[in-house]
Image: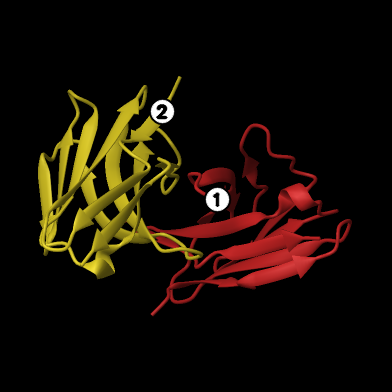
Chain colours: A yellow, B red
Amino acid sequence: SQKIEQNSEALNIQEGKTATLTCNYTNYSPAYLQWYRQDPGRGPVFLLLIRENEKEKRKERLKVTFDTTLKQSLFHITASQPADSATYLCALEVVGSTLGRLYFGRGTQLTVWP
Amino acid sequence: GAVVSQHPSRVICKSGTSVKIECRSLDFQATTMFWYRQFPKQSLMLMATSNEGSKATYEQGVEKDKFLINHASLTLSTLTVTSAHPEDSSFYICSAFRQGVRNTIYFGEGSWLTVV
């Protein structure tokens, strides 16, 4: 069956450390993998997109890697801050699927404590 | 600022009544919009794909007669929950697909529905 699994439901780290979140997928052929931030009671906010032929993408303190052999993406937040506390969602756009249709993981709730 | 607006952000309705949620793309035309539902601590689950000028495509297990979707213009899709029951209480989120040089997906802020 098709699955998108995010490593843990919750991750707690100290301010200044690097947060690493994992997304593994099974039985999907992704064209793109995206990461979103979701705050409580709000819609998802787009962070980064990486294509299936790309290995790594960076944006400010964020870095995403994509390994299609391992079927895994890692999402890193360096120099984390309490304001980074939120739920982070991994989502796939799949080859052959309707453009814009996303398949989501359950999310990892990140808490950064001072 | 928001490029996809969802309204209302919160709504409480009585069991058996219907409630409409709107999703608008503010500064672009969206031929395709998507409706998701999210239960607490769960992932966003696609309910249906809304195509301007044609019938919506529903995911397996989603009752099309209960969740009516209308995409009457290139900037507006509506989701109507008919004969709502308490188990329909959830967070409903829309997204709009902007096609162009850089295809982009924009999400609305979501609508909390509570059925009492």
SS for dot 1: loop
B116 to A50, vertically: above or below: below
Q: Is residue A17 left or right of residue A25?
A: left
Residue B104 appears in the rendering: no
Label 2 marks which chain's residue? A
Quarter residue A17 falls in:
bottom left
Residue B91 appears in the rendering: yes
Q: Is residue A76 left or right of residue B31?
A: left
Read off the residue under disc 1. B40
Residue reaching furthest right?
Answer: B16
Where does the image place residue A97, in percent across and percent down from the top left? 43, 36
Label 1 marks which chain's residue? B
Residue in the picture at 27% in, 52% down = A12
- What's the residue type where badge 2 is placed? Lys
Query: Gap between marks 2 and 1, in whole Å?
Result: 19 Å
Residue in the picture at 17% in, 37% down = A66
Foreground: A92 or B73?
A92
Foreground: A90 or B28?
A90
Where does the image place residue B4, in percent across and percent down from the top left? 48, 70
Q: Is residue A16 left or right of residue B12?
A: left
- What's the residue type where badge 1 is placed? Pro
Where does the image place residue B23, in percent across and percent down from the top left? 58, 67
Discs 2/1, front: 1
Read off the residue under disc 2. A3
SS for dot 2: strand
Residue in the picture at 30% in, 62% down = A85
Q: Is residue B14 left or right of residue B107?
A: right
